[in-house]
Image: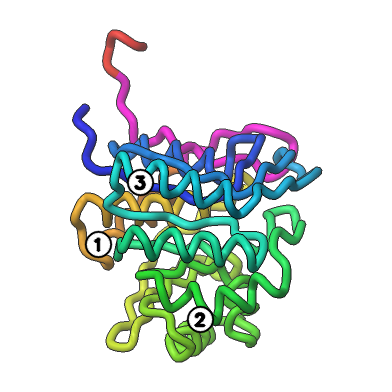
Amino acid sequence: MNLRSKVLIIAGSDSSGGAGIQADIKTVTSLGSYAMTAITAVTAQNTTGVKSIIPIKPKEISLQIEYSANDIYPQAVKIGMLHSKQVITAVNKSLNKMKIKKIILDPVMVAKGGAKLINSDAISFIKKKLIKKVLLITPNIPEAEILSGMKIKSSKDMITAGKRLIQIGAKNVLIKGGHLSSKKMIDILISKKLIKEFESKKYNSKNTHGTGCTLSSAIATYLSCGKDLIKSCELGIKYVNEAIKTNSNLGKGNGPINHLNSINLDKRFK
């Protein structure tokens, strides 16, 4: 298989392999592109929760970004866990040097098990600085509530929250509707000129660990291959839905999705 593009991932590590940078690498690779990484934190976790978080020094994160990109220049960047104001500042400066436009921010704030992964100063700095820089931000409903300062109980609320994020500087917002108590899955893309709903089947599964990381990485990959934003969101959502549908059922808690659902193995490797 010929590589379709290069994607730089800036995110935290998940030792269980279901979310974070491990999920990102699996996603980019499964969709036929080349993944590079800058690790922002190392976590000890499994499907039942997060045991510990060890932050990487901002200088080392910048070195990872710049040293990788100076040699293999990416067509897109996906940003995940940024746990402090200092890390966000370092990442922002490094991205300014790269002058890349296709940047996707997944504002990781709370782990699936409820552990807080980011401090209040970092949230404020994302709103003031980083949100204006990226092409797309992909919050789930709890994250969109934190960023917009409002409760979200319906698809109408999702649109209102998205418009609030546009008002504070976001270019495009894709709010993921998985936390709504609805029969169908509704994700909504909002910009100054556009409101686009993506409706899909909602699968009743506890194995949804890493869906947010996976979606943002899939969108970044499709963008890096030259597809437009709407098509990239559509295909990214489809990839995640198929990964949930093919239920891996690993672990005792919120298990990972199946990132390999898009791969057909050559007969020689079966």
Other residues around mark 1 within 10 Å, as few (<14) / some (14–19) / many (≥20) = few
Residue 265: percent from left, percent from top: 31, 21
Image position, residue 209 (x, y; %): 60, 47
Distance of label 3 from label 1 (alpha carbons): 26 Å
Q: Secondary structure at mark 1?
A: helix
Residue type at tag 1: Lys
Q: Quadrant of the C terminus?
A: top left
Between the residue at mark 3 and the residue at mark 2, the CA separation in whole angstroms equals 35 Å
The span from disc 1 to disc 2 (Cα, nearest Å) is 20 Å
Q: Amino acid at mark 2?
A: Met
Taking the image as shown, residue 201 lies to the left or right of residue 98, namely right
Which label was assigned to residue 158? 2
Which is in the foreground here, disc 3 or disc 2?
3
Magenta segment includes 249:
yes
Residue located 63% across and 64% down the image: 86
Question: Residue at coordinates 69% horizontally, 55% vertically from top-left?
Answer: 111
Q: Nearer the viewer, residue 174 or 81?
A: 81
Depth check: give the residue in front, 207 or 79: 79
N-term-proximal mark, 3 vs 1: 3
**119 and 27: which one is in front?**
119
Question: Label 3, on which residue?
Answer: 69
| Residue 206 to residue 34: above or below | below
The outermost residue toward the top is 268
**Does the magenta segment cover residue 183?**
no
Residue underneath mark 1: 231
Q: On the image, which quarter does residue 150 sit in?
A: bottom right
Q: Quadrant of the N terminus?
A: top left
Q: Which mark is residue 36?
A: none
> In terms of image quadrants, where is residue 252?
top right
Q: Amino acid at mark 3?
A: Ala
Magenta-colored span: 244-265
